Image (cartoon, rainbow, N blue to C red):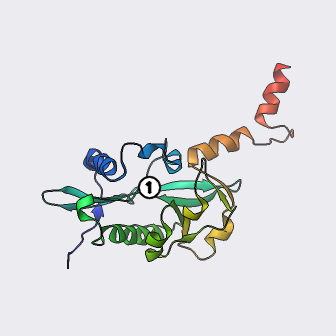
Amino acid sequence: MTTITVEAALAADHAATENLLDLTFGLTRSTKTSYRLREGNTAIAGLSLVTREAGLGLTGAISFWPLKIGTAGTDALLLGPLAVHPQRQNIGIGRALMRAGVDKAKALGHPLVILVGDEPYYARVGFKRVPDGQLEMPGPVDPDRLLYLELVEGALAEAHGLVLPPYRFAELSAAFAVPHGGKGHQQQAQAAQG
């Protein structure tokens, strides 16, 4: 039986992680909708994890990213990408990375994790399919692949609507905020010009 040691990713691992992601998913990986949620976003400190092996370097990598969901701005995490070196797949590295990451996220008080992936694979650590129409991603996603894991019981019930990175949620919230005068910022700007 292989012992799998999961450890925190280091800043120096960035290039090796990108190479592992390219090797695992191909160069078109950044065209996927889940990448819209990572652009301009920063992975949660302490929740980027790796596995290593002499001769191969990084054999696995996972990260978790902050999200805001719906007009309420419900907090959640995006799991991914999860990558395992092609020469080390099917020996438990992916599950070890997910379990370690989910345990750390729960210990940090995060309530909910979502991802886009293969349900039979991710169900091994408890992920389930999001009910149709509950969450809207910022691009096309097969609804059968939109999955969630509650780290706090009932957390999914609080999450409805568009899933965004925190900076986009803040931008949109500010743009559509309704001050005491009853007009949003865009309406006020138009009134001031006209």
Is 166 situated left or right of 178 in this image? Answer: left
Closest to the observer: 67 or 89?
A: 89
Q: Which residue is mark 1?
A: 44
Residue 142, position in %: x, y? 58, 57
Closest to the observer: 40 or 122?
A: 122
Residue at (86, 40) in percent of width and height: 182
Residue 183, position in %: x, y? 84, 37
Residue extending furthest toward the bottom: 1
Residue 148, position in %: x, y? 55, 67
In the rendered image, the vertical position of residue 76 relative to residue 190, given as above or below? below
Residue at (78, 27) in percent of width and height: 189
Q: How many marks?
A: 1
**Quarter of the figure that contains the C terminus:** top right
Closest to the observer: 17 or 142?
A: 142
**Quarter of the figure that contains the N terminus:** bottom left
Residue at (49, 76) in percent of width and height: 126
Q: Is residue 107 something one can see in this rendering?
A: no
Residue 181, position in %: x, y? 86, 38
Is 34 situated left or right of 104 in this image? Answer: right
Residue extending furthest toward the left: 55
Is 80 situated left or right of 112 in this image? Answer: left
In the rendered image, the vertical position of residue 161 relative to residue 127, given as above or below? above
Quarter of image, res 98: bottom left
Q: Is residue 75 something one can see in this rendering?
A: yes
